[in-house]
């Protein structure tokens, strides 16, 4: 696959319009990622400011003293407040307060379900962030001879491993969807049916998100004469 940065392999006389069009597309390739990243960060900062600053008394806001509404003040306040809450929560008094508050929530039928669900998601995403997918892999899904990229999480354990009718080890594989890799399917496959890939999890995620357009480091897989895949060039 060629990009706007690649030189024309078949040089020929081109019109002024074609050269301008090529330069315009190249400019878009350069500007779009930078512009969208800045816009996204700027929007998130504004969203946090809009949520936090109304909770701060007017006399404590920076614009009351300097006359300028500084963007990002709400983010700084949020970070400091979160760090302080985490520091208190790790202490003996903080843990006691948390247990006392959760005991009250447990007595509320609807609130209890909402709180427990949000707590489990928060612990999975933040408190256990060191747990991540081990490797990228290839599996045959949804039928034989159709290949899909997945992510190996762990070796299946407990009741799942005991009750599965297989003689070997089971591997839990997350099969992401395109272009949103945060949704997908959890599959338990025999270890011999899972082919581990040399590419990193991040590279495999890019391949999934781009719907197969972006390969790791721009490398294309080659095929050996015997039909088996060989290493990338």
Image (cartoon, rainbow, N blue to C red):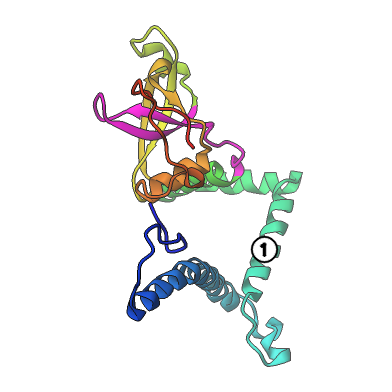
Residue 201 at x, y percent in the picture: 51, 39
At x 42%, y 49%, the residue is 214
Name, please, the residue furthest toward the bottom. Answer: 67
Q: Is residue 192 above or below residue 5?
A: above
The answer to whether residue 172 is seen in the rendering is yes
At x 68%, y 44%, the residue is 96
At x 26%, y 26%, the residue is 145
Residue 1 at x, y percent in the picture: 38, 51
Secondary structure category for the residue under label 1: helix
At x 58%, y 46%, the residue is 126
Q: Is residue 143 magenta?
A: yes
Q: Is residue 102 magenta?
A: no
Residue 158 at x, y percent in the picture: 47, 17
Question: Seen in the image, is 100 located left or right of residue 164?
Answer: right
Name, please, the residue furthest toward the front. Answer: 12
Name, please, the residue furthest toward the top. Answer: 167
Please give the range of residues in magenta: 127-153
Residue assigned mark 1: 79
Q: Is residue 31 above or below residue 156?
A: below
Q: Observer-nearest residue: 49 or 108?
A: 49
Q: Residues within 10 Å of mark 1 (few under 14, many from 20)?
A: few
Quarter holding residue 183: top left
Q: Is residue 195 above or below residue 178?
A: above
Question: Seen in the image, is 201 located left or right of residue 24?
Answer: right
Residue 12 at x, y percent in the picture: 35, 67
The answer to whether residue 107 is seen in the rendering is no
Q: Observer-nearest residue: 12 or 125?
A: 12
Q: Is residue 32 above or below residue 189?
A: below
Quarter holding residue 184: top left
């Amino acid at each position: 696959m060629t990009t706007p940065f690649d030189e024309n392999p078949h040089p020929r006389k081109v019109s002024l319009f074609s050269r301008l069009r090529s330069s315009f597309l190249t400019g878009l390739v350069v500007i779009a990622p930078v512009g969208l990243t800045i816009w996204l960060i700027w929007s998130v900062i504004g969203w946090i400011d809009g949520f936090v600053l109304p909770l701060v008394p007017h006399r404590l806001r920076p614009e009351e003293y300097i006359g300028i509404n500084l963007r990002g003040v709400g983010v700084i306040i949020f970070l400091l407040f979160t760090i302080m809450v985490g520091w208190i929560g790790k202490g003996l008094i903080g843990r006691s307060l948390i247990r006392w508050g959760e005991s009250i929530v447990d007595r509320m039928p609807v609130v209890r379900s909402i709180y427990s669900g949000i707590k489990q998601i928060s612990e999975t995403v933040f408190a256990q962030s060191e747990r991540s997918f081990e490797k990228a892999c290839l599996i045959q899904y949804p039928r034989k001879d159709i290949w899909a990229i997945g992510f190996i999480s762990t070796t299946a354990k407990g009741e799942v491993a005991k009750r599965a009718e297989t003689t070997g080890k089971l591997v839990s594989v997350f099969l992401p969807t395109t272009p949103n890799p945060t949704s997908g399917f959890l599959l338990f496959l025999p270890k011999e049916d899972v082919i581990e890939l040399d590419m990193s999890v991040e590279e495999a995620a890019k391949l999934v998100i781009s719907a197969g357009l972006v390969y790791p480091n721009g490398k294309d897989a080659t095929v050996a004469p015997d039909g088996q895949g060989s290493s990338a060039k």
